[in-house]
Image: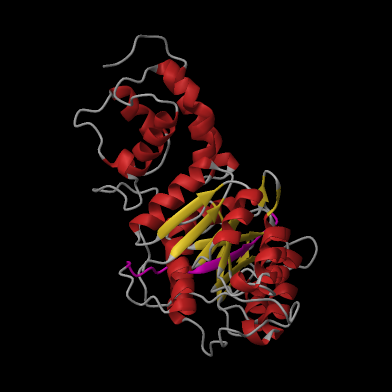
Amino acid sequence: MKPHILVVDDSMIVRMDLRGSLTAAGFDVTVCETKRAAEELLDKQSYSAIVLDVMLPDGDGVELLRRVRDATPHADTPVIMLSAEAEIRDRVRGLSMGADEYVGKPYNIAYFIGRVRDLCRARRGHEQLEMPVIACRRILVVDDSPTFLQYLAKLLREDGHDVVLAHSGTAALEILAVQTIDCVVIDRHMPDIDGLETLRRIRQAPACESTPIIMLTGTDDLTVERAARDAGADAFVHKTDTRDVIRSRVRRVLRGGRTSPAPPDAVSNIGSSNARRSSPQDSTRRAPPSPYAPLPSPMPYSTGATRSQPKELNPLFVEAASAMGLNTQLARDTLAKALGRMSIDPQRMDCADLARTLPALREALRMFFSPDELMPRIEALTSIAMRSGSKTR
């Protein structure tokens, strides 16, 4: 029997994407969009795992998590929280309440499926599932500069990692208290607790004493680098370094791994001793392809309704998909889904049809891009939609 996953999220785009992805990976999937609907489903049957959004239209996802943990039939059901990356307090609250995993949006679908698979195996022993081996790491990036924070997040996500963002040393320590992190990239200068002091506190925690840590700085002062290494940094990166240099440093410390890994159920003494921890991915696994790179074949999580594209595509459809900034197949699938929900044939769409679809496309692209990255893509799509002309056939 296939593992059965319940997905609770008020975003139609997310529900469709996760249902298609999980189904293609070998799961049975039930989706709903409200807290009330989820409660009714949970009263009727059990599930192998639950994917739960924090913000629901009729209630708090963390409160629903509390009910799941208090209910005997579901007390040990793995729960993955899913919400906006910026909501640090929600991440800490959800994991402290008993979530087994917390994945921020935009999510890496390969990482997400890998975590669902691992949690189902841990609970029920579904070793018979034939799914691809996933190789992502969870990296915590700490910087008080929103611009550089988003730059690093995009860079590391392109390498297939799950990236957690923190705007201060305090926020970083709160995250480390409740969630296992495979690598920390931390800025030297921050307003509340500076990078060196944050690094020292991380090293004092038994569960984090051997976590790879990279120190960021904007200065070439060698005494700063020496101080960072004395505090326990494994590597040192200048903010002016090229993308390739930053990538190579992160890859190098990840290849080195932890010298003495903490047990999976170890809890950091930075925070509550009751916090649940999630396990990192195997260091030997390969990273999945970047969603930003062109793919020669359809993505495995495309739904049946969108996999079969016309042989000779509508030029306007192709142009709009290209403006979205995703890999070719993912962009076309996402655009086709948005058009399909409005009963628009992609092969017959015109500029007015594209304009009607813009709100849905904005929501879809928000999963993959930061606000700064999202804006030029929406502007490009709007520019295409504002053209005059008849339907392209």
Q: Is residue 163 left or right of residue 170?
A: left
Q: State the residue at coordinates (40%, 69%).
A: 135
Residue 248, picture quadrant: bottom left
Q: Residue furthest top?
A: 389
Q: Nearer the viewer, residue 94 or 305?
A: 305
Looking at the rendered image, the quarter that the N terminus falls into is bottom left
Residue 263, picture quadrant: bottom right
Answer whether residue 134 is magenta in the image.
Answer: yes
Residue 139, picture quadrant: bottom right
Which region is colored magenta? 131-144
Q: Is 63 above or below relative to 319?
A: below
Q: Is 1 above or below relative to 255?
A: above
Q: Nearer the viewer, residue 52 or 269?
A: 52
- Residue 335: percent from left, percent from top: 40, 34
Q: State the residue at coordinates (25%, 28%).
A: 313
Q: Is 265 above or below relative to 192?
A: below
- Residue 73: percent from left, percent from top: 60, 71
